[in-house]
Image (cartoon, coloured by chain):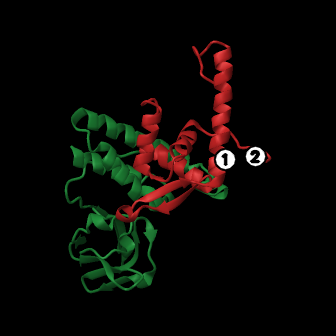
Chain colours: A red, B green
Amino acid sequence: MPIQQHEALTPLSAAILFALADGASHGYAIIKEIEDLTDGDMRPNTGSMYLALHRLLEEGLITESSGPGEDARRRYYRLSETGRAAAKAEARRMAQLVRVASAKKLIPGSAL
Amino acid sequence: MRRVAVQLFSLSLQLLPLKFRLRYASEMQDVFLERGRDRSGLALLIFTADEVSGLVATALRARFDPSVLPKSAIAGVIMATALTLVVMRSFPVSTTTSSAVNRMDVSAHDPAGEFTVTIREGKAVAATIDRVPLPRHQIVHRGDSIRIMSRGGEVVLALAYHRDKGQIEWKARSASCRLRAAECVSP
């Protein structure tokens, strides 16, 4: 299968795609997931989050859907196939950078 | 304190481009409320300041983002951003009027948002709701009564015009009509 070229994502866009990797989620849950995944290092404000969500929607990397029955009024977001491929590409890119950083002993004891 | 924080955030949402605001503002407001729920006092103040400054930055970036505004619009936009913080009370109603000979311009806001009415030669000739101009047929002026109608013909805003005093009065619209005031009939 040919490898698609995906442009590098901004840190926040990448974090959003990773947060959605397990399934659809709404805005507040995405922010909480990002904070949890980064141990609090990344705490996007609401404005930045929604601008990033909008860009990802426009680029077709995520799609909107309605929530489950009792939460129908919330807007949920999920990865598209293109978005999942972009997230994988970004993860590979980051892993490569971590390998470089580890080889240069910038990161002590990398598991990669 | 929490009410002021919510009102500051709501006010700051007005900085966002109209289409972006119509699409996301309600959701952003919900997220702000959820994120601020467990905060109080100084923590709430810091959180609110961070969120409001984030909205200012987002508004600037959004106005020059081709995914939010088309490039042709960006080329024509000159952004001069000033954030005016107004502490609003429970039923924020304020008006400003300017009048020249035979003309009165009313600019007002209440919990549902902003509106303007232009009265020329004693007749309401123009109006906007949330900065969107309304067609003439949606402005009905009879005697001392000015009614702003929705597209469906329902009254969304009823004003009493006191020509002799150069004043208007109206019953504040509900906050539940915010961001859809042109089509919302207040309970």
Instruction: Say if A110 sits above or below A32 in the image.
Output: above
Q: Secondary structure at mark 2?
A: loop
Q: Nearer the viewer, residue B183 or A19?
A: A19
Q: Nearer the viewer, residue A93 or B150?
A: A93
Instruction: Say if B36 sits above or below B161 in the image.
Output: above
Q: In which quarter of the view is residue A33 placed?
A: top left
Quarter of the image for the C terminus of chain B: give it.
bottom left
Please tell me which residue is depicted at 33% across the width and 83% down the height of the picture: B154
Sequence order check: which comes first, mark 2 or mark 1? 2
| Residue found at the far right of this picture | A2
Kindly identify which residue carries mark 1: A85
Of the residues shown, which amino acid type is indicated by label 1?
Ala
Quarter of the image for the N terminus of chain B: give it.
top left
Q: Position of residue B121 (x, y in %)?
A: 35, 79
As drawn, is A110 to the left or to the right of B18? right
Kindly identify which residue carries mark 2: A4
Chain designation of label 1? A
Please tell me which residue is depicted at 77% across the width and 44% down the height of the picture: A3
Asked if labels 2 and 1 share a chain, the reply is yes
Q: Are marks 2 and 1 in contact (CB under 8 Å)?
A: yes
